[in-house]
Image (tube, grey):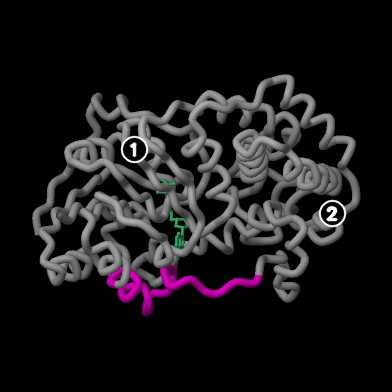
Amino acid sequence: MTTSTNAETPAETTFALLPPTRYQGSKRRICGWLGLHLSALHFTTVLDAFGGTGSVSYMLKHLGKCVTYNDALAANREMATGLIENGRTVLSTSATSNLLRRITSAAGLGFISETFRGIYFTDEENDWLDGACRVIPKMGDRFQRAIAWYALFQSAISKRPYNLFHRANLNLRIADVERSFGNKVTWDRSFDEHFRHFVKQANGAVQPTCGTCVASCCDVTDIVGEFDLVYLDPPYINDKGTGVDYFGFYHFLEGMLDYEGWPARVDWSSKHRRLIGEKCRWTNKRRVAVAFEEVFERFRDSRLVISYRSDGIPSIEELVAMLRRQNRRPLVYRHDRYRYALSKNKRSSEILIVAE
Ligand SMILES: C[S@@+](CC[C@H](N)C(=O)[O-])C[C@H]1O[C@@H](n2cnc3c(N)ncnc32)[C@H](O)[C@@H]1O
């Protein structure tokens, strides 16, 4: 196994970055390091199969590549439609003010205020969210609509303790106690104010595309098409066997996007009203190795680039062995100084495997 450690260098800052986000596992902060490795390879078409925030797709788009972004979460695909697929449409300040006026008029009792009372947001905020979910789907232009969803989702994440929807913990935010974490000022800032801020950020990130860029939403095994290079950044399972459950963390965003269909998708036995969903293979320590092998096989004609953690399951040695069995020549790179937001894990480092 060939290993090299790559510290950040000033050249890294020359790669285009998406606006910051608190989404779990975002590669935004190491896009410079990834960009140095990726730009050394020859390719035109690229698949970002577990796209998440789209930070890697965005950087690849700026390198002039034809990017296919994919993620299993529809909310992520929607945001990528606004920031990756979209090459020129913005949501003007006047259109944003007009949209916010319509949301305020449409606000009031609805599925969110009835179902999520006292769980994630205050009653007034729930009413506002019901208004937003009634108005945004009616927007005519799909790129402007995607920017509006982006602003709504980022606002909702910003106002949550831990930036997640994994627990019914509104009380953490509103209780009158001393806190050692989080930012109560951000949590309590109105949706209206957050929304305007995130529309501005999204507008600033919209850039023309050289090649064609598209955003899709499906399981990695169902992606159609062939690509010169496939970038894989799957959910990470740590050495204790715990995987990052993206469906559990962000179900509320999925629900807002499918406002009409949401009631039929809620798991009413869960205290925090998550969505009914199958357990994902990528978060199951007994099934994840087979999932990797199947994806390597599916994309056996593409160059593969894989992000993982040094203490993950499967181990880096196992992943390298799988790739060698396919007659590939994997090279392993290590970035020692990167830790994820909210992570206390100081032992593990970020790994990049490049397999010709
Ligand atoms: C580590 S994150 C990717 C982070 C991304 N590279 C970024 O910079 O934001 C993993 C992503 O995989 C998605 N995902 C989970 N299971 C999936 C599946 N079976 N197929 C496609 N995407 C999946 C999750 O929704 C999550 O956004």
Residue at (80, 46) in percent of width and height: 134
Looking at the rendered image, the disc whose residue lies closer to the viewer, 1 or 2, is 1
Residue at (69, 57) in percent of width and height: 255
Where residue 186 sits: x, y (%)? 66, 35
Q: Does 179 sit left or right of 234 as displayed?
A: right
- Circle 2 sits in a helix, a strand or a loop, which is it? helix
* Residue 235 sits in quarter: bottom left
Quarter in which the C terminus is drawn? bottom left
Residue 286 counted in the magenta span:
yes
Quarter in which the N terminus is drawn? bottom left
Query: Which disc, if any, is residue 247?
Result: none
Residue at (90, 51) in percent of width and height: 109
Q: Determine crowd level at label 2: few under 14, some 14-19, many 20+ residues with C-alpha closer than 10 A.
A: many
Q: In the displayed orientation, state which residue is furthest to the bottom.
A: 286
Where residue 34 sits: x, y (%)? 28, 41
Circle 2: residue type: Ser
Most foreground residue, 181 or 215: 215
Magenta region, residue range = 276-293
Where residue 3 sits: x, y (%)? 12, 52
Circle 1: residue type: Leu
Residue 38 counted in the magenta span:
no
Q: CA distance from mark 1 to mark 2?
A: 40 Å
Q: Along the polypeptide, which appears first: circle 1 or circle 2?
A: 1
Q: Which residue is mark 2?
A: 113
Query: Which disc, if any, is residue 60?
Result: 1
Q: Determine crowd level at label 1: few under 14, some 14-19, many 20+ residues with C-alpha closer than 10 A.
A: many
Residue at (51, 56) in percent of width and height: 217
Where residue 272 sits: x, y (%)? 71, 64
- Circle 1 sits in a helix, a strand or a loop, which is it? helix
